[in-house]
Amino acid sequence: MTKRFCILFTAILTGLVFLCVGTLIAGDKQVVPDKVTIENKGYKKDKKRPVPLSHKAHSTDKKYGPVKCADCHHVYKDGKNVWKEGDYVDKCSKCHDPKKNTKEDGVKVMKLQNAYHKNCKNCHKKEKKGPFKKCNDCHVKK
């Protein structure tokens, strides 16, 4: 009876260890929301409204995408984007200041609005999909 108990106890304990490790690993991953709102926080004056972005449409649907994650998300080291799918996604404003252009490691970093506009508008224009000419096509009315 003691031998069976030890085997059963070991099996249960091993299962719990795998369950805990799996839960911890899964908890490290970011949840990718279907919709994201690009806010205007930090600007001197909020001239335009926030921009709703369908993350799901851009990453999976044929209407806009599929757009590669690294086309929008980036972390530059020595002039090369080293961000890869699954890496943590910081807020754009962590590097892109809303009020002014900055420098990081001697490299010019665009202010936030210019970074958004360059990335979004240029992609929509290149792909000939989605809005890129009129402000109100992206900055929807409240």
Image: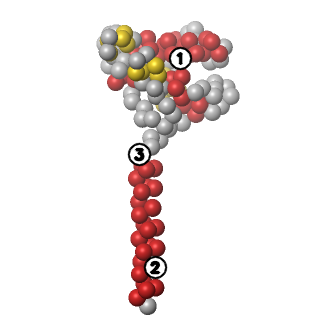
| Left or right relative to 112: residue 32 | right
| Position above or below: 2 against 74 | below
Distance CA(mark 3)–CA(mark 1): 29 Å
Return the residue at label 3.
Answer: 28
The N terminus lies in quadrant: bottom left
Distance CA(mark 2)–CA(mark 3): 31 Å
**Residue 94, x across and y down, in percent:** 34, 24
Crowdedness of circle 2 by 10 Å Cα count: few (<14), some, many (20+)? few
Judged from the image, the secondary structure of the residue bearing numbered disc 1 is: helix
Front-lying residue, 130 or 9: 9
Is label 1 in contact with label 2 (beta carbons under 8 Å)?
A: no
Front-lying residue, 119 or 107: 107
Crowdedness of circle 3 by 10 Å Cα count: few (<14), some, many (20+)? few
User: Which of the numbered marks, if any, corresponds to residue 120?
Assistant: 1
Q: Nearer the viewer, mark 3 or mark 1?
A: 3
Q: Which of marks 2 and 3 is in front?
A: 2
Return the residue at label 2.
Answer: 8
Of the two numbered discs 3 and 1 on the same chain, state the one appearing first in sequence: 3
Residue drawn at x 54%, y 22% is 71
Does residue 141 appear in the picture of this structure? no
Residue drawn at x 66%, y 14% is 128
The kind of residue tagged 2 is: Leu
Front-lying residue, 53 or 7: 7
